Amino acid sequence: MYNFRTDMADERRDIFKKANKLDDNIPGIESFERIENEYIKSNTVKILDKQGEQALGKPIGKYVTFDLKNLKLAGEEEIEDASNIISNEIRAIVSEKINKEGEVLVIGLGNQFVTPDSLGPKVVSEIEITRHLLKYAPECVVEGARSVSAVAPGVLGTTGIETLEIVKGIVDNVKPKLLIVIDSLASKSIHRISSTIQISNTGIVPGAGVGNTRKELSENTLGIPVIAIGVPMVVDLATITDDCLDLFIGKLQDEAKSNDYLNQLKNQDNYEEIRQALIPNEYNMIVTPKEIDELIENMKEIVSRSINYAL
């Protein structure tokens, strides 16, 4: 298994193709890109069988990544456009799994006291909750509204309880038909921090991208479909160093295009060598941008609106 150092399916696909010098699709994998508008594109990766699952280290299913690279700090109009586009994908996946009356539980993973990890709890605070209204004040709910509840269960370090244990207890008692789980992710690229949203129909393994893996939240463990929505908020230091090395080599190549050694160095993946150099001194830190507060607020708006519109 490759050290993918990323939660993003399309990045894992690219790492695998580069490592195996593949130009075509990986066996067991289908993928395609689509331009959504002038500043948003989507990239769909479908893992079709066990061969594809083994190649990317992710479960069989569909992974749709939206790149919003010009929307790191978006205005109201851009947030609304992005929310409408992303809500269409969420709505389509929900419709495949449950009927229009099926109850949905939204779970916001993460630690609300650690800014890069606070996306899930912040999104939950903006979800339009209807479950109690449908029961006690149905006249206050728009006709045809779906029953929606939401909770932010916290993290093992602050609760002493595995997230799966908390969520399973809620699922067993509330009995929703589907879960939507929101979490902060890790990426292999500094360019994707708070500018990419991944949606999958396979559930999620909390903490996997930063080497702090917890028990998975999926249909296998909870008995109901789980849609995962994630946004990269951190990268590790080795990834930043690798990216910076590429940028540095690119600059040198512009000045000396015939340097064979630099060409070779740029074309190979240097992450493992850099990571191994950093680990002995415990320098392989997890890094997030200095404007993370504003970035989280921006993405909170897009993700919460997308879910509200879809439901």
Image (cartoon, rainbow, N blue to C red):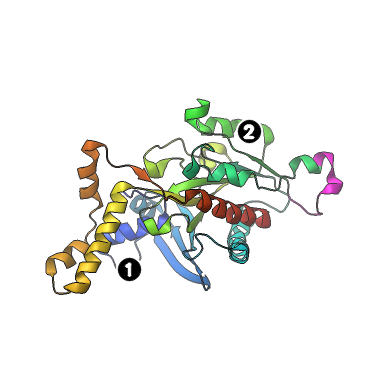
Residue 168: x percent and y percent?
Answer: 58, 33
Decide: few, some or many residues near mark 1? Use Cα within 10 Å; few <14, some 14-19, many ≥20: few
Q: Is residue 309 magenta?
A: no
Q: Residue at x 69, y 53 (%)?
A: 99
Q: How many marks?
A: 2
Q: Residue at x 30, y 57 (%)?
A: 243
SS for callout 1: loop
Residue at mark 1: 24
277 relative to 49 in the view: left or right:
left
Residue 263: x percent and y percent?
Answer: 18, 67
* The quarter of the displayed image where residue 148 is located: top right
Q: Residue at x 62, y 59 (%)?
A: 87
Q: Is residue 140 magenta?
A: yes
- The magenta-colored residue range is 135-146
Q: CA distance from mark 1 to mark 2?
A: 44 Å
Identify the mark at residue 170; answer none if there is no mark: 2
The amino acid pointed to by label 2 is Ile
Mark 2 and mark 1 in contact (Cβ < 8 Å)?
no
- The residue furthest top is 160
Residue 216: x percent and y percent?
Answer: 47, 39
Q: Residue at x 59, y 44 (%)?
A: 122
75 relative to 282 in the view: left or right:
right
Decide: few, some or many residues near mark 2? Use Cα within 10 Å; few <14, some 14-19, many ≥20: some
Q: Earlier in the sequence, mark 1 or mark 2?
A: 1
